[in-house]
Amino acid sequence: MIKQEKNIIVAIYASIDAFPPTINLIQQFIERGYNAYTIEVSKKKFKHSSIDLFHSRVVDVHRKLPNMVRNYYVFLKLLFGLIKLHKKSNSNEFVVFDAYTLMAFVLLKRIGILKPNSKLWYHNHDVALSSNFKIGSLGWIVHKLENKNLRYVDFFSLPAKERSIYFSSRTVDFILPNYPSIFMYEKFKPEMIKKDVNVIFQGRISPGHGLEAVIDIINQDIIDIRVSLTLKGIISRDYKNYLLSKISDEKLHRVKFIGYTDYEDLPKITSSCQIGLAIFQPKSFMHATLGSSSNKIYEYIACGLPIIYLGTEHFKEYLYNYPWAIDVDDSPTSIAFAIQKIMNDYDELSKSAKNTFVSELNYEAYFDKAYAIFKN
């Protein structure tokens, strides 16, 4: 008897490498015997030394075109790319991650290009409202129709339960947190502490993350421990210059900026530090619902780093009961006290963080349940 080939098409209107949960999902399907066909909107194809994509397509972002023209042009290329992937794979199973790729799937299904029995998993990575976009723009259209398009979805998941209020037309089938994967992080642990305690913040580097407070700690040597700061991620030139202006000349060597890197390289960078800075001011609904949707918070503990987080009611709901998570009010004094508290019992807190990740807060633990529901 010939074994039937299993193919899955995964689509995202962004770079796969910029959205780690997409990487995790692809790997989980591959582990279950699927051939992964992917399409993304990016400057380059996603590559990972341990993930073997069966076939991938990239829709270039075409920076030279005017914004509105470019977005429609890119969307059309996405549609045609999906058609080609569908013909090549003969797959009737799809996973999409945003309102753009959801709209593309719906259009192809309604005009009869996709099979009637095509099965769609929609994992909404980031909530966006149509009011955030210019009327008539592609972003306005796809988000305006997002709730209506959910009727074509067979399995609907979100990374945070709080975000379900935005999707009134359909019940959420599963909460699939954006936790990192054991596959990617199991072998990593923090480097031995030498002279400095290296605090890392990873993500988009901007105000609202306690960075100025950590720089004050460095400048004033508020505690006996010598603190360094690693900033990993994209930063505007103005904000970088502002932070540099706050650092005293003799302490400049204790603040390090690392720009964008491939996600595969991140665990090595994270594990070169000792404490993760997970302060997120609730500037928007997205920032206020990161308790289970922020992969960054849990990438710290995946490397065995205890974390410092903003002690809002939301974050305490998710983190308060873990000894490796210390809540602060984002002042220099509060953060300095948290660093001292962590360092007083570092080995135990580091082991606890890593054990919690491996046993509980990892992508695999939740994906197993989500996959079973999707297939049934």
Image (tube, helix red, strand yellow):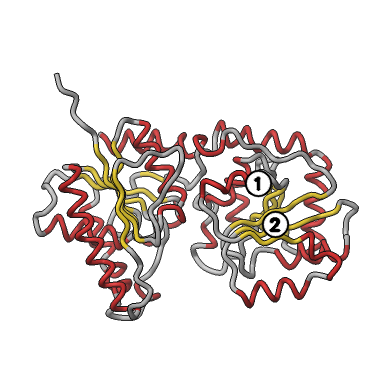
In this view of the protein, which residue sits in the foreground, 39 or 284? 39
Label 2 residue SS: strand
Task: Please tell me the numbered disc located at residue 320.
Answer: 1
Q: Which residue is mark 2?
A: 230
Residue 150 as seen in the image, left or right of residue 280: left
Which of the 4 image quadrants contains residue 73? Answer: bottom left
Residue placed at 20% from the left, 53% from the top? 152
Give above or below for 109 relative to 212. above
Residue placed at 47% from the left, 46% from the top? 177
The N terminus is located in which quarter? top left
| Count of marks, rendered view | 2
Label 1 residue SS: loop
Residue 172 as seen in the image, left or right of residue 363: left
Residue 77 as seen in the image, left or right of residue 255: left
Which residue appears farthest toward the left when viewing the image?
112
In this view of the protein, which residue sits in the foreground, 56 or 130? 56
Residue 241 at what x, y percent from top left? 69, 75
